Image (spheres, helix red, strand yellow):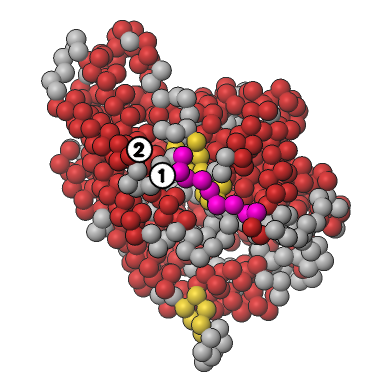
Amino acid sequence: MENNSISAKAEVPRWEMGSIYSGFESEAFIHDIGALDKVLSALEFSLKEPVTSDTFPGWLMGAVTLRNEADSLLVSLSAYASCIYSADTNNREALARINALEETALVRKGLEVSFRNILWKYRLLLDSAYSALPELASYKWLIDEDITARTRQMKPPLEELAEDMKRCGAEAWSRLHQQVTSNLSIAWDEGGTKQKTLNELRNMAYDSSREVRKHAYHRELELLKSAEIPLAAAINGVKGSAVILNRRRNWKSALSKSLFQSRISSKTLKALISAMEDSLPLWREYLDLKAGLLGIPRCSFYDLFAPIEQIGTIGTWSYTDAAALVTDCFSSFSPDMGELAKQAFGEGWIDAEIRQGKVGGAFCADFPRQKVSRILTNFTGTFSDITTIAHELGHAYHHRCVKELPFSQGQYPMTLAETASIFAETIVLNRILSNAEPAARLFLLETHLQDGCQVIVDILSRFYFESAVFEGREKNELSPAELCSLMEEAQLRTYGPALCRDELHPYMWAVKSHYYESDLDFYNFPYAFGLLFAAALYSRYEKEGSDFAETYRLLLSETGRLPCEQVCRKAGFDIQDKAFWAEGLSQYAKTLSRLKELS
Ligand SMILES: [Zn+2]
């Protein structure tokens, strides 16, 4: 790729929001807020209406339609408020709207409990309801899922109490984790005055000087140790609440709840984990190679993200060139995906400018009412900025594939959420790779393996750790020392001899916010699922060429209304078979041998 330094900063755009809502006081916004209230009242009313076996089919169709109406309004309004806020965190009105919509979301959630109870009561009438109303039959699997959810819910007043108490229970513990970690700082040098925050220290893992990385790592561990008591209390609080509620709700374990949320079977998870375990020698070989390139005998935890000096980087792109490149890559895959990119760049979907008051990172927000998406990113022109845009546009493409479906049929689980985004990234990465100079190619291959190593090896260590935490927490609270030793054991089991035994990261449990999510446990394996599923799809694309584009579009359109196994079977994949996951991993083995050849 050509090297273009960013010349015209002004070309980096802000997004266009006016066509979604032209403000919180706009007619359309006020109208939709009113419509949401009305739909929720109608839904509440229908849940109190007496239902008989004769009226059940009509009642169910009505309730399902009202739920779709309410959710698509709620999601669109909330996405708008949070986009406005993310682009300007000083906007107090946006924050107030977010809070008000959160309250509405709680009301909506409460209605779900009653809906499932009625569904449960009349479940034997479902088959005749499907014959009476064919439109209802397209919801069959989702309704079955609601029935399972009904067997995992407490009595309505208890569910209501649990929801209320969550705010000063698990969610409060989660906020404590956020507040403690975002306010921690430590002197850079013993006795010095220059302070470093936890984030600053963690970012130094990317520094090219090993001395800097090592020093930052030791300061980080010291900093986390200083806060280990409240942080351990927070993780014990979150996981303790989960243990109690899971037991009350008849979940066999936190993992079985997580499998349900992910829409996969335990057989699928076993196949995935076992393939990840089998691939460990590959990743250890990569880390040994990396150590060699860094000129050290063995990597330590603080070398995992180290840039390799002699490789260098691949320069920067202007925003206009980045847009042209991504559009071109997407169009080369399919006209449909190309259209999406043209629409996104041409109609102001992307806020890429860096400015004060705007949040960091990147996300894609979908607006089901308006059938469009918006993307926030912070563009500096680096390679990773390009893949980030591709990633978020991949999410937007996923939304494009489901936007015409009834709302609930387009809601995919976290396991499938990252598929479209990673697939889009892969298209762009491979295109850049094929045009790159040898030095740039080395950089790209190494970066690709570095990312893969995180999603396979580190994620596996997090899965082991979280399993051990649940096992321990069921018996008693875990001390900071116990948490540290569980973390080290998990890292030793995965990174193995590829990392220095005495320079692992025992405090990773204190860093990763995923362990502190009140409603989501095991928010780790879905990442590996997404990565390897996308890799397997890409292998298939390489074999089938452009014919694959239509299979891909159809597959994405099914992601919200079937369990993952069935979605994947439609594409010809058996995800309960370890060989499927090994196929995705083999892409990384290929990358490693290319890296070895080039270095
Ligand atoms: Zn994503």
* Residue at the spot of label 1: 22
Q: Residue at the location (35% across, 16% down)? A: 136
Horizontal side of residue 413 vs 39, given as left or right = right
Q: Residues within 10 Å of mark 1 (few under 14, many from 20)?
A: few
Nearer-N-terminus badge (2/1): 1
Q: Is residue 554 magenta?
A: no
Left or right placement of residue 418 versus residue 278 in this view: left
Place residue 182 in its image quadrant. bottom left
Q: Which residues are magenta?
A: 11-19
Q: Position of residue 340 (x, y in %)?
A: 61, 34
Q: Is residue 317 visible?
A: yes
Seen in the picture, residue 138 relative to 491 is either above or below; the reply is above
Residue in view at x 26 percent, y 37 percent? 34
Q: Which mark is residue 28?
A: 2
Amino acid type for the residue under numbered disc 1: Ser
The amino acid type, in three-letter code, at marker 2 is Ala
**Which residue is painted at 54% across and 34% down in the image?**
398
